[in-house]
Image (spheres, rainbow, N blue to C red):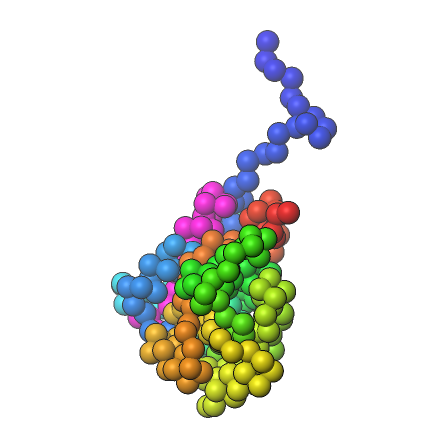
Amino acid sequence: MPRARQSGRHRRPEPLAAPEGAPALVLAVPGTPTSASRSLAEEVSSIARSELPGLDARIGYLDGGDDEFPSLEAVLAHAAAEHKARAEAEGQSDPGPSAVVVPLLAGPDSALLRRIRQAIMNSGSAAELTDVLGPHPLLAEALHVRLSEAGLARADRARLFTVATAADGIILATVGGDEAVQAAGITGMLLSARLAVPVLAAALDEEGAISRTAEQLRGSGSQQLALAPYLIGPEITDSLLGAAAAEAGCASAEALGAYGAVGRLVLSNYAASVGIALPTQAQGVPVR
């Protein structure tokens, strides 16, 4: 006899998968395309696919333009053509958006977002654009991890041990002007609560902002500073970070990179746009 179907609260949840014909997730990668940025983008996409099997995840580069680094406009145009052909074959009159574009940005950058919108328009696709990834508590967690990996913060406040090089003041470095600094400041407050040290945001692309922020922290009593890039990575160069750390006279952690939370937040933005309900872990919400 077949087993009875479980019901009620003891019923096993249906395995989550991308709906049939769902729009593609297109990761919009800023900056000069390199093998490092491609590896990072591929890892972020892989994290998203692992959380949502069947997800059609693609990568488009704002400054791309060849087979190795396809431009965002070309990737969207190709996705739109495939989407249209599938809809015609299935007799759909309103197939919906062909893609959902998720910017690989921790915070807002009006210049880059303007270029992404322009690429969507130029592609002629019915693609939708999501918000950037932050501010979000999981980005504060990622910043904490990067600082601890560099020996600039305790890995866990609950463990009563000290790190000799732990910073007592953090400069949260971002790009994108005042709007980006304000958004980074929200995540900075969350990071400050985690580390129990002052955290101030500053723009890497504003002359003198990093040194002024360092002076402000030192003036309030911080002696050992650290630079924490509130950046995924491709949007800036290593030399820019190195120059900022030298300007502040302190050590720097690595950029956020392909930290697991970054991939989950990319998927969370996509799912919110498409209307897919994700489990708590995949939504980028910390599980207590």
Residue 102 falls left or right of residue 287: left
Is there any visible trace of residue 207 in the rendered image? yes
How many numbered markers are drawn?
0
Between 198 and 174, which is closer to the camera in this rendering? Answer: 198
Q: What residue do we see at 49% from left, 75% from top?
A: 224
Is there any visible trace of residue 209 in the rendered image? no
Q: Quadrant of residue 184?
A: bottom right
- Quadrant in which the N terminus is drawn: top right
Between 282 and 110, which is closer to the camera in this rendering? Answer: 282
How far across and down, in percent of the image, does residue 121 sit?
Answer: 48, 73
Q: Quadrant of residue 67?
A: bottom left
Residue 109 falls left or right of residue 136: left
Q: What residue do we see at 54% from left, 72% from top?
A: 168
Rendered position, 213 above or below 152: below
Question: Most extreme residue toward the bottom, as rendered?
Answer: 207
Between 25 and 143, which is closer to the camera in this rendering? Answer: 143
Question: Most extreme residue toward the top, as rendered?
Answer: 1
Between 51 and 206, which is closer to the camera in this rendering? Answer: 206
Residue 174 falls left or right of residue 72: right
Please say whether residue 61 is one of the residues in the magenta stretch.
yes
Please say whether residue 214 is one of the residues in the magenta stretch.
no
Q: What residue do we see at 59% from left, 70% from top?
A: 197
Q: Which residues are magenta?
A: 45-65
Q: What residue do we see at 55% from left, 52% from top?
A: 159
